[in-house]
Amino acid sequence: MARTRISGKAAPVSFIGVSKTYGGEVVAVDNIDLEIEAGKLVTLLGPSGCGKTTTLRMIAGLEMATSGKILIGDKDVTKLPATDRDVSMVFQSYALFPHMSVLENVSYGLGFSGFPKSEARDRARAGLDLVGLEGFDDRLPSELSGGQQQRVAVARALVLEPQVLLFDEPLSNLDAKLRRQVREDIRSIQQELGLTVVYVTHDQEEALAVSDVIVVMRNAAIAQIGTPRDLYDAPVDAFVADFIGEANLIPCEVVSVSAGSAVIDVDGYRHSLASRGLPEGRAQLAVRPARIILDGNEGFDATVAKATYVGVRMEYSLETAFGSIFAVQDDVMNPLRPGSAVKVSFHVTGPVLIPSE
């Protein structure tokens, strides 16, 4: 007998001028436009209250848009209930039935979708194979680890072969080691099946690790959309720079601009970089800790306030004329001592000009 396989039927998702308000006053999502390509894993990332979970729930049909239009594929689903949308959702709490076996949990939704019992059982087993839980059919959720329970929840969603698979903070209940493993599993399954996945998290590292595209949200709106590298290397403003990874926000003066290149001044140290459309005058520099050079022949003055050994690198807190900055260095054999005077400069690539606040 042919083995049952789970396949994807990915569809794009479009938000056109979508807003969501509560009570006519509280704006949860404010007039967003968003295109999610079929077969991509797109992460909605941002602090609590930014609108990311509401956006996810509007795709699922668990919240209805106050205005605007939502499309899944070519179908307008704006007013459709959750039961009439071809989507599946994996919740933060897993939402497994404690009295049902693993196989019964995974096959539960298939019964409501009209599958015969034998086919539902075969599809459920195929789903368990896909998430690495072959042979766990008869176990109860209470007999599984947190990571295994999460995989059961993923399998239950996958067997329905949805056009869009939604994840709401799926790793928040797992410890650090399991988080890394399960996020790799989710990414692997998404790529293998070519699924359209929309994934919500507030964890920047998690977003960078799993995403094709990240949508950074702030105050119910979209702050920036891009690939993980785009957002890390070229944030549009101080919020994105500081939220995606760690960045030093350093005041600077743009002293000249020519042919898309700028020369900036930081406490007497001059550095050339892309102007990014900014004119001469006050601006900020977003500099990742690893893009800082210490104790070179040029740069601005700083004092080592704190030196911390963390195994693979040294971490330094530095005091400057304009405030504190943070730097990391790979040289653990020759650490700088607290109280040392150093020169601080920047790598040729890495620092990014952003508007002054």
Image (cartoon, rainbow, N blue to C red):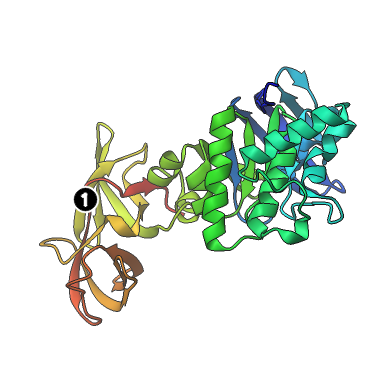
Location of residue 333 with respect to 210 vertically, above or below: below
* Res 187 visible: yes
Decide if residue 129 is on the left or right side of residue 289. right
* Res 81 visible: no
Pick the front one: 308 or 2: 2
**Would you identify the image quadrant in which residue 308 lies?**
bottom left
In the image, what residue occupies the spot 51% across and 35% down?
212
How dense is the environment of label 1, judged by Cα within 10 Å: few (below 14), some, or many (20 and up)?
A: some
Picture coordinates of residue 279, whole percent (x, y) = 34, 41
In the image, what residue occupies the spot 69% across and 31% down?
164
Q: How many marks?
A: 1
Decide if residue 144 is on the left or right side of residue 303. right
The single residue placed furthest to the bottom in the displayed view is 339
In the image, what residue occupies the spot 58% across and 63% down?
175
Picture coordinates of residue 302, whole percent (x, y) = 24, 71
Residue underneath mark 1: 271
The single residue placed furthest to the top in the displayed view is 74
Secondary element type, mark 1:
strand
Pick the front one: 339 or 42: 42
Picture coordinates of residue 256, whole percent (x, y) = 24, 43
Location of residue 340 with respect to 314 vertically, above or below: below
Picture coordinates of residue 117, whole percent (x, y) = 87, 31
Pick the front one: 1 or 331: 1
Location of residue 75 with respect to 105 vertically, above or below: above
Q: Mark 1 is on which residue type?
A: His
Decide if residue 264 is on the left or right side of residue 65. left
**Would you identify the image quadrant in which residue 111 lies?**
top right
Q: If the image is split into quadrants, where does the N terminus sit?
A: top right
In the image, what residue occupies the spot 30% across and 53% down?
253
Decide if residue 128 is on the left or right side of residue 248. right
